[in-house]
Image (cartoon, coloured by chain):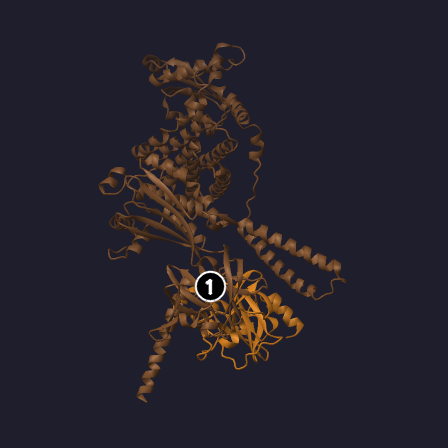
Amino acid sequence: MDISDFYETFFEEAEELLADMERLLLDLDVDDPDVEDLNAIFRAAHSIKGGAGTFGFTVLQETTHLLENLLDHTRRGELSLRRDIVDTFLETKDMLHDQLDAYRNGGEPDAEAFERISRVLQQIALDELGQQKAVTKATAAPAAEPAPAPTPEVEAPRQPADDQATRDGAENAKRRLSIALVGVSDKDRALLVEELQHFGTIVSQSGDAQRYQVSLDSAESQDDIEAVLCFIIEPEQLSIEVDGSASPGAGTETPEAPAEREPAEQAPAPVSEPAAPAIPEQTTSPEPAKSQAAPARAAGKSGGKSAKGSESSTIRVPVDKVDQIINLVGELIITQSMLEQTASDLDIVSHGPLVNGMNLLQRNARDLQESVMSIRMMPMDYVFSRFPRLVRDLAAKLDKDVELVTEGKSTELDKSLIERIIDPLTHLVRNSLDHGLESREKRVAAGKSQTGRLTLSAQHQGGNILIEVIDDGAGLNRDKILAKAKSSGIAVTDTMSDDDVWQLIFAPGFSTAEQVSDVSGRGVGMDVVKRNIQEMGGHVEILSKPGEGTTTRIVLPLTLAILDGMSIRCGRETFLLPLNAVLESLQPQAEDVYSMAGDDQLLKVRDEYLPIIALHHALDVAGAKTELTEAIAVIVQGEGRRYALLVDDLIGQQQVVVKNLETNYRKVPGISAATILGDGSVALILDIADLHRLDRRKSQQRHEAKRQHLHEVARV
Amino acid sequence: MSPQANMDAHIADAASSEYLVFSLGDEEYAVDILKVQEIRGYENVTRIANVPEFIKGVTNLRGVIVPIIDLRLKFHLDKVEYGGQTVVIVVNVDDRIVGIVVDGVSDVMSLSPDQIKPAPEFGVTLSSDYLSGIGSLEDRMLVLVDIEKLLTHEEMQLVERTAESV
């Protein structure tokens, strides 16, 4: 599978996240924002960033990174929201959407737009977090640094032609810029002037709403200033001219002069003076030219594909709708078999059309069932094949050697679960790479091979699906986690069990990483992971040994997973055994059965002695065959234990839809789930390992009772 | 109750709520009708081992596995027969669907708050924990069962927290 196979999924996901983000931003109460909502917005940005990083959509990743930084401050309460900040966030969201569309059509996003938005976002960070300027700068700078990187390749053809020269000049010397604002309202103007102050010293300002003139001494290039101002007004409303170098003399002696002269000179400029427009044109023209060029390029690159790409070839459907269809189809099958039963009693000759119709109905119903079922099931490969790229890039970024091993790719999982497992799994993999695996030097020092190993595995077990992320890194640091928990005000004690300590890392905002990197360490990851898994009805376990590594295990229930089962009969009841637990079945011979320590019995199967568990004993089935040699022994294996399960009869193999018992009831000992048979009745699916435990408990109870009885008899 | 009075009760008392009345033996019980999802006949139930007797097992309700409990067994009634009148009231409480076997369903009653008397302290079989009161309607007495409390009550063993104790 190629990584580009998943582009579409990412686009859909990201689009959904952006829609969520917009909705939340719009609902946000600026004066008293809900922390949950802020967290949700932040997580949406975080997830998009993660995805964009995976697929190498650099511009998208960097834009979201900037946005995420601000959102992070917001949710910590360090940045108080204002309407205009929210507006900027919304604008960024629109920008992200445009970028997404550009990538979707196989193009590159508009670099200028990206530059502009990242400047605005950085400006907010500077303005609003003034007191923490130093801190923000430190984090914003590395974020901003890669920003220009992708732009040259897109901008390249344009750059030498236009403002390279002016820009170079601008970098060194402060110049006097005269900025004209045309048709700008008072409110916006105040805002613009305020913005301009950040670029340099305002020498003079005058004019009215129609035309307002500002003289500014600034080292910034015209493009930069325009980029910022264009968030408030349209490019047509703005013109920026260079007045020449801001010599100290000109700046201080004649502050009024340029301002007064300018309007007169400027007003007729576009009509009469050919020289004057030359400069404004240079600054404003790239904008429309660019926006025309961008779609053209996108269309040129993707050609016919763009038309296809923009129209999504899949539909996202709520899971419960699919569930409903599956249930209804199940009912249909049952009704159909009932009808068939009735029709089979009729005379074929006189009811020919009916019988033909029944056959047709049967075929159609089966086809329908198959197609509905196939909607849901997908191999784990769909998830796992996303990771080699991610691991490679991350390993390179972190300067570590990592070998990725995947196991159980063909394990089938419900589509809804597959889709929802991707994000948590991505977080876990990132965490393992960043925090789990040590650097080469540390590994060698610890006597391990230089290359770290990251294993992703999936398997069905005891009615659950186990997905594990295993690293052979340093393991979790108990002391560090406890210390961090204490400092974040979480109630902990030093005597907590390891398991409890490991669970602490799932607390919101918990991260022991000293530095926030764009890989991990913000402390969003793990709480999202836990939340996502819990929403799926599963749970997360962590096993960690210092120096040996960490295993994060996701246990998901088999909701709606399909099981290959073997149906068996015991008494008048039907049960299902998971086929992968069944090794073989045989008729026990009297000479192969050995007694041990009273009640326990062993069955000799080819040099191996297996304990015998009678199903009718464990589950109190009435009317079962009690004579060992009449029953059938099914050799089963679960959680490493192997035993012979005595049943009355084998009925056959069939694929069944696993129905959770816990939805409306609770966990039943010895049973993993239930399913619905062809006749509409419910059959229970046996949990091989738990059945063994159940039988142990029961025979212990029997022993107790027996001993008590003997005791009483002895006394009498 | 005269039709006029009935109508008045409907108009005047917005606080009155409707109850589904069902019979267990000779006694009449009632549950809040808003909790009732549907009423269906008693069908084949798949037995579950190692659970209390009153949990009859699970059944298939349009593709959903639903536990069925027999309130007659739970309330220790003498006669427990499955006949044509035996029905299952399917209730939906706390996002769970549970079927309750009863001897029959009679009617739907509207009870105003003043018709509901507090539940007296009962003996051991019927804990007042899950009774919301006694509805008195002329000469009829309805035992109002708080179905939500009853089904989540520990002794029902329907909910997970008791699962470990076998």
Q: Eyeballing the image, is A130 above or below A221? A: below
Out of B75 and A708, give the one closest to the viewer.
A708
B68 to the left or right of A46: right
For the question of whether residue A667 can be seen, the reply is no
Q: Quadrant of the C terminus of chain A?
A: bottom left
Q: Eyeballing the image, is A491 above or below A256? A: below
For the question of whether residue A455 can be seen, the reply is yes
* Image chain in orange: B
* Image chain in brown: A
Out of A94 and A351, give the one closest to the viewer.
A351
Residue plotted at (54% across, 69% down): B45
Number of numbered discs: 1
Looking at the picture, how far across and down is residue A157, in whole percent? 46, 19
Q: Eyeballing the image, is B107 above or below A143? A: below
Looking at the picture, how far across and down is residue B66, in whole percent? 52, 64
Residue farthest toward the bottom in the current orientation of the protein: A716
**How many neighbours does mark 1 have within 10 angstroms: few (below 14), some (14-19), or many (20 or more)?**
some
Out of A265 and A695, give the one closest to the viewer.
A695
Q: Eyeballing the image, is B32 above or below A31? A: below
Out of A203 and A271, give the one closest to the viewer.
A271
Looking at the picture, how far across and down is residue A629, in whole percent? 46, 72
Q: Secondary structure at mark 1?
A: strand
Q: Which residue is mark 1?
A: A585
Looking at the picture, how far across and down is residue A339, in whole percent? 67, 63
Amino acid type assigned to the residue bearing label 1 in the image: Ser
B76 to the left or right of A331: left
Chain for numbered disc 1: A
User: Where on the picture, by quarter, is residue B9?
Assistant: bottom right
